Amino acid sequence: MNEPGVLGCGALYRFTRPLLFSFDPERAHEMTLEGLQRAYDLGILRAAATPVDGEPVRAMGLTFPNPVGLAAGMDKNAAHIDALGCLGFGFIEVGTVTPRPQAGNPKPRMFRLPTEQALINRMGFNNDGIDRFVQNAMRARYRGVLGLNIGKNAATPIDRALDDYRAGLAAVYPHAGYVTVNISSPNTRDLRSLQGEGELERLLGALREERARLEQSHGRRVPLAVKIAPDVTDAQIPRIADTLVAFGVDGVIATNTTISRNGVEGRRNADEGGGLSGAPLRPRSTEVIAALSRHLQGAMTIIGVGGILRGGDAVEKIQAGATLVQVYTGLIYRGPALVTECRREIAAARKNP
């Protein structure tokens, strides 16, 4: 690994974080991406880039250069893939994208809980639409695995959600390493109802047919993952797992943000609506991973996400049954050094189980 480059990026982030945290969280998010992109375009970021390879992992029929990925939500429009790729991720997931552009929910819609190393967001799938998203993805030269995350437009009635997911799958399929179906965001009305038994079967049945058509048309099978909520009950987990297997889904991403406020009660911003991410989510996301792993017995790849703020948190997800992990909120609080730390500690844990 290019440790000096990583340390340089980490030191720069530690220096700039107080400034970024003085801004509204959404504006700071935009500034971070703008800064990364500028550094990439000038060649500065590329000079300090961390190689993506080093600890390859086979999952979902793909070879991931390393097991640490970026979760969806950071780069909603697939506009900064190559810049983010310089941080050493083995895979990057971009989106969530919807068929038509949409503004998302009213601002403010992102809130920090710094003492708890957490965020609350109610962004609402704000994005520039599938056409711009695909154009951006096509330009990327990133060497890791690229995941493209699809959702439904807020204006689409829930009983027509299949139309949006089919359209999304067809548009991103030729350009994806894998496709994630997001049915678990708490910020689009009724979206989580698609995790219900009948609704999930109808959705996956339609996507199985669409993928079969696309596989024949494009001559390759693109893996499909489904992202689930941490707020499913323990009794629901085996049923969801069985349904995913029955419809040929390749991976399950556990988990999205939570509507629970366990661990942050009474804190500033804790009563804001939206999904909570970061350290308070870690125990529940790991519980869901472990429950999935016990039930699936290796039948499907599990990607663990939720509350990874240090390398040991990533190892915990792997030991619970995840094959791969993703970070997002931890990256905001820790910066690029978190990626290297997670890679290093996962590699050490696998050498000394």
Image: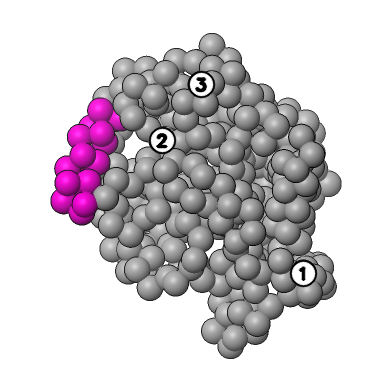
Magenta stretch in the rendered image = 204-219
Could you tell me the amino acid type at mark 2?
Asp
Q: Secondary structure at mark 3?
A: helix
Relative to 198, residue 268 above or below: below
The quadrant of the rendering that contains the N terminus is bottom right
Question: Could you say which is closer to the camera, residue 297 or residue 268?
Answer: 297
Q: Secondary structure at mark 2?
A: loop
Q: Main secondary structure of the magenta part?
A: helix
Which residue has dot 1 on it? 3
Q: Is residue 121 visible?
A: no
Could you tell me the amino acid type at mark 3?
Leu
> Where residue 320 appears, x then y in whole percent?
67, 29
Residue found 54% across the figure and 34% down from its top: 302
Q: Which mark is residue 251?
A: none
Question: Could you say which is closer to the camera, residue 105 or residue 299?
Answer: 299
Distance, label 3 to label 1, CA atoms, is 37 Å
Which residue has dot 2 on it? 250
